[in-house]
Amino acid sequence: MFQDINSTKPLRSRLFNIGLRVLSNRECGSLEASDTLLGIPLYGTDPTTTIRWLDVNIFRNRRVKSKSDMMMLEPESTDIYYESWIDDHYPKRPKELENTHLYSFAQNYDIVKTRPVSSKVKYYEINDGKKFLKRRANPYLINHYFYDGEQVPEKYFFSLLLLFKPWRSLDELKMGCDTYTEAFNFAKEDLKEGIDYGNSMIES
């Protein structure tokens, strides 16, 4: 790097060389790494791949509504947070999706304000008909922080229970056990998809 800075080459050439060094030594995500290995260009738009982030922390931050939205609330209202997939949409999902886990729910559905017009689109009315839960033609690519099961087992098993065990309230995830690790081991026969997913994340 210092050789490029102290070089007698023109400034443009030196900056170009420094830029190449920075790019070649930086960290990159799994998607960028896989695209690079497969020879797929890192620019442009892929309409079939859309990422949805899920916060799988045991203690999550929530986005507080703006001041203008707060002013529209009733004085006694405690509805101060914007809706989220984990805290609102999934727990209040239609009864037809009772056995659908969070990973599949977030992967395959969108919340829209207008009723879908196509008869081929599957949807459900939610929020007393004010919004609609519409099934996507192309699933989202679900992304989230992945915990090390050996270093932080409680966070690791909580995330798998959260994603792959159907629930209506987060209190259900422990299933009467003292820890999320115990709860996962108790229900692991019904969580084979979660086990396979966890193993695949470790291997990747």
Image (tube, rainbow, N blue to C red):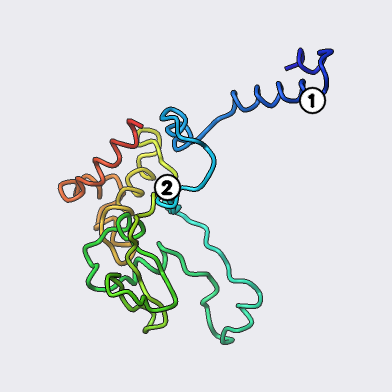
Q: Is residue 70 above or below residue 174?
A: below
Residue at numbered disc 1:
12
Picture coordinates of residue 151 (x, y %)? 40, 34
Q: Nearer the viewer, residue 164 or 142?
A: 142
Q: Residues within 10 Å of mark 2 (few under 14, many from 20)?
A: some
Amino acid type of the residue tagged 2 in the rendering: Asn
The tally of labels here is 2
Amino acid type of the residue tagged 1 in the rendering: Arg
Residue at numbered disc 2:
143
Residue occupying the point 30% across, 40% down: 198
Q: Nearer the viewer, residue 59 or 167?
A: 167
Residue occupying the point 35% across, 77% down: 117
Q: Nearer the viewer, mark 1 or mark 2?
A: 1
Q: Nearer the viewer, residue 102 or 59?
A: 102
Q: Residues within 10 Å of mark 1 (few under 14, many from 20)?
A: few
Q: Which mark is residue 52?
A: none
First in sequence: mark 1 or mark 2? 1
Residue occupying the point 24% across, 67% down: 97
Give SS at disc 1: helix
Give SS at disc 2: strand
Q: Is residue 67 above or below residue 8?
A: below
Picture coordinates of residue 111 (x, y %)? 41, 69
Image quadrant of residue 19? top right
Which quadrant: the N terminus? top right
Mark 1 and mark 2: Cα distance apart in space: 39 Å
Picture coordinates of residue 176 (x, y %)? 24, 57
Image quadrant of residue 102? bottom left
Q: Is residue 91 above or below residue 47?
A: below
Tell me whether circle 1 and circle 2 mark residues in contact (CB < 8 Å): no
Q: Is residue 41 above or below residue 174?
A: above
